[in-house]
Amino acid sequence: MSTVPAIENLRSRGRFRDWLGDRLLVIVTATASIVAVVVMGAIVWKVVDASHLAFSKFGIAFLWGTVWDANKGIFGALPGLYGTVVTSLIALIVAVPFSIAIALFLSELAPRGARGVIGALVETLAAIPSVVLGLWGILVMGPFVAEHIEPWLHRTLGFIPLFSGSPQSSGVFIAGLVLAIMVVPIVASICRELFLSVPHDIEEGALALGATRWEMVRGVILSSSRPGIAAAVILGLGRAIGEAIAVTQVIGAGWTIQWNLFSTGDTLASRIAGQYQGAASNIQISSLFYLGAILLVFGLVTNLIAQVIVRRFDVRMGGN
Amino acid sequence: MTLRAGGRARRRRIVNRLVEWLATLAALGAVAMLAIVIWSVAKRGAGVLSWGFLTEDLPLFGQPGGGIAPLIVGSAILVGIATAIALPVGMCIAIFLQEFARGTVRAAIQLVIDLMAGLPSIVLGIFVFGLLVYGHPQNGLAGAYALAIVMLPLITRATQEVLRLVPDSQREGAFALGASRWRTVLGVILPSTLGGILTGTVLAVARAAGETAPLLFVTSIYPNTIQWDPRHALPNMPVQIFIWSESPDPNDHKRAWATALVLILFVLATSLISRAVLARTRRNLGR
């Protein structure tokens, strides 16, 4: 008789503890999530806020200003924008075909045993710190490219203004190549996952109809994963636009706009990194933040576009 | 009469063979690139590397000799603090996303994490500079915070991935036994995913150890001796490699190679080991 209330008591105590534990766990984990959102908001707010001085002085014209003169206090972003676009384009032109080929090898051709190992090695390329890749770029790859590749490009394509300059061991072209090395593992590993997720029965259907492996790849795999490839390329582009350290090391600095790819130059990110000690006046620091705000917009937009594509792509795959 | 592929069929076969060769070459090219970079660093760095190099203070400007002990200690402190912040927060976010959040809230927080992962690291660098260092002396804590922001989305995603692998039958089993939500999460789900979370964290540590851009503005002017106090600027490997690589002095280049070798050995060893462990965890949890 007397045991019944005791059990009831125990139960309600346990129930209370469970109730409290559940609430606490939700509150703690939700708080952590809110912290992440707040940090993200703080990043946007701080970068925009700190560029306010430069924005109020130069306005939107900062984007097409070509001068960066610390003595006169005049700053403009156009040469950096140009450098960012050119280096990223070189990186994508070199890296995208390469990455898709690697992904095809890993998903379609590689023997089972080699697949995992080679895939891991390609991903390890992304683990090399950018400062080490930059060191290698300026002291090993730069001189090699200046001695062997640029003279050849100059001889055969020198009539195009892009390749008209004399070879140099640091410059825009070499920066593009170093960025390509960083972009390849990103695009390749995403594309491999995409290609592996193509349903086997349509692949086999194409083969059964007499298509060669390449025809099957072109007609089935590549065409059905086109949106995913676009997302991968955009993520790679975001990486190339935002990379500061390795580019600063190999691009050689120079706030000019010229066709010659072999000349030295600057990207938005490399200008910020390059001035880490030199910024003296408030207006110069604020201008660096303005460059950072442009980079932030690029970073957010490329990632948003990639996310949108991924989500739509998923929906479509689900609908089929 | 014999059946022989002629004309069009032959061309198709040749094109096919050609593309297969190109794809194979591309993969070998990427592997060769990795080998060339590692080999370059090893060849140039190994000659300089010695016990003295690892244990002595930084060389004074223009002087021969010296070592990188302050860089190793500083990097360890920076990454240690960053991990202490990013690991619990990242784990909590992942638990919230996988176990509690639904609908719009979930999508919004997931989006923030994804965007955070895609932020250019130099932007993080100027963010902490503007928030904590502008107008104050440089300090290691600001650098550690920036590295924590680098690590946070990596750890969150790694934790989410292993949480997703836990079969629902485990959750349902725990519920059926009368266990409450928090008991299920802390007592059943987390223990079985701990290995995966740990390896994800180690991968994030490897990534953070090599990040230069977040530190460049906030902890790049430091003394040449070992520093323990993160409230002051801490010497660290990536920034020093950057500074040495920009120097015209060939001796500085040698030091940069040797430091790069130390850094790359750490990064490669940790990421290869954790990748192997992760693959095993995935297999064990998966089916």
Image: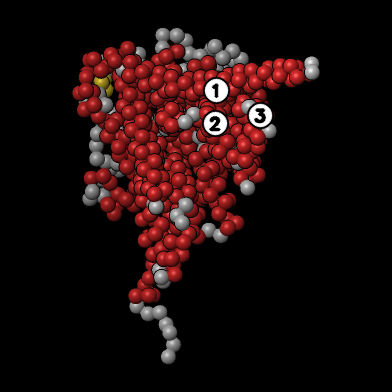
Vertical placement of residue A278 versus A253, above or below: above
Model colouring: secondary structure
Coordinates of residue A299 in the picture (x, y in percent): 36, 31
Task: Report, in whole angstroms, how far the alpha carbon at label 2 lies from the one at label 1.
Answer: 9 Å
| Residue at the (58%, 58%) spot, across then down | A112
Give the residue number, with chain letter if any, for mark 3. Answer: B179
Q: Is residue A201 visible?
A: yes
Which residue does the numbered mark 1 point to in the structure image?
A26
Q: Give the amino acid type for the residue marked by disc 3 in the picture.
A: Ala
The residue wearing badge 2 is: B99
Do marks 2 and 1 share a subunit?
no
- Amino acid at pointer 1: Val
Q: Quadrant of residue A248?
A: top left
**Helix, strand or loop under label 1:** helix
Residues B28 and A70: in front is B28
Question: x, y (%) of residue B277?
Answer: 64, 41
